[in-house]
Amino acid sequence: MKIFISADMEGVTGVVHRDQLVPEGKTYERARKLMTADINAAITGALREAPDAQFIVCDGHGVMRNILLEDLHEAAQLVIGPASPENKPLCQSQGCDETCDVGLFTGYHSRSGTPGGLLSHTWVGSTVCNFRINGEIVGEAALNASVLGHWNIPVAMVSGAHELEAEARATLPEGFVFVGTKQTYGFTAALCLPPARTKKLLEDGAAEAIRRFKQGKLKPHKPKLPVTMEVETYRREMTEKACRVPGMERTGERSFATTANSTLEAATRMWTAVCRAQDEEPGWLK
Ligand SMILES: [Zn+2]
């Protein structure tokens, strides 16, 4: 079995603040360790049900060089490097392909605009106000699930702060396991479980997730084709820049969309457009 892990950082055990999320932050090095530990726990749990499994882990946050390779479980290989469209067109799903069987999302967060959500955003916090797939507002969980769905790969587990569960249950096919790492108080505060507790929750959650997958209980997320992905930005200039990407159509003063015959094609094109919408090339893309 080949298991794809898309790993973000905002939903990781103990992470609540931007200082923990950027290399300049004083607490970043500790957060990297916590992120790597969450992933290792998911791998350890999955191996209980699939002892021969291989894992592809995509570092899917910011500079995308957060996970400590030297501490990563030996059953895994790691996708490292910034997600410029030339580099990692699939962004947080880079490394996944038709050879993978099932997906796990660790350290995920709620979508842009979630009331009271912890570090909530979609793809690029400064740019994306809303992201829609076929008219439905979604976050990164459903967005990446739709990319995996292109290859009929279901998502078996999502982990993150507690408010993400409602979003994921509303926008992903049912049956996946949700593992809560913390109870959100506000945008930068939460009641956090220590790693000693989340380790067990993530191990048990991943084991249950793979069990459900093996029992055939999970469905891939497959939005109706042709699929339309639409982004509403915060400023008109962002939309103007994004619309220079071939295949983008302006749908409003601050919004643009693309329609494609596959989620893979639409998501790849949309990621390119969101990158191009930046005022200047941001540090995390270099
Ligand atoms: Zn992130």
Image (cartoon, rainbow, N blue to C red):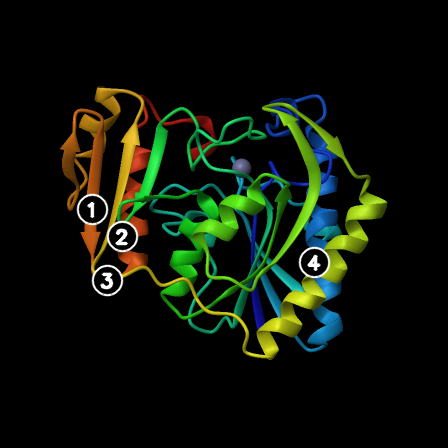
Query: Which badge, 4 or 1, is on the more N-terminal residue?
Result: 4
> Label 1 amino acid?
Thr
Q: Label 2: which residue?
A: 266
Assign a secondary structure to mark 1: strand
Question: In this view of the protein, can residue 1 be seen by the observer?
Answer: no
Q: Label 3: which residue?
A: 225
Q: CA distance from mark 4 to mark 1?
A: 35 Å
Q: Nearer the viewer, mark 2 or mark 3?
A: 3
Q: Position of residue 180 (x, y in %)?
A: 68, 46
Q: Nearer the viewer, mark 1 or mark 3?
A: 3
Q: Position of residue 82 (x, y in %)?
A: 47, 41
Question: Residue drawn 18% across and 26% down?
Answer: 240
Q: Position of residue 119 (x, y in %)?
A: 56, 29
Q: CA distance from mark 2 to mark 3?
A: 11 Å
Q: Label 4: which residue?
A: 42
Quadrant of residue 140 within the rendered picture: top left
What's the mark number on residue 258? 1
Query: Which badge, 2 or 3, is on the more N-terminal residue?
Result: 3
Query: Image check: 176 left or right of 39?
Result: left
Dot 1 surroundings within 10 Å: few (below 14), some, or many (20 or more)?
many
Residue reaching furthest right? Answer: 196
Residue in the foreground of this view, choosing between 134 and 34 = 134
Dot 3 surroundings within 10 Å: few (below 14), some, or many (20 or more)?
few
Q: Position of residue 70 (x, y in %)?
A: 73, 50
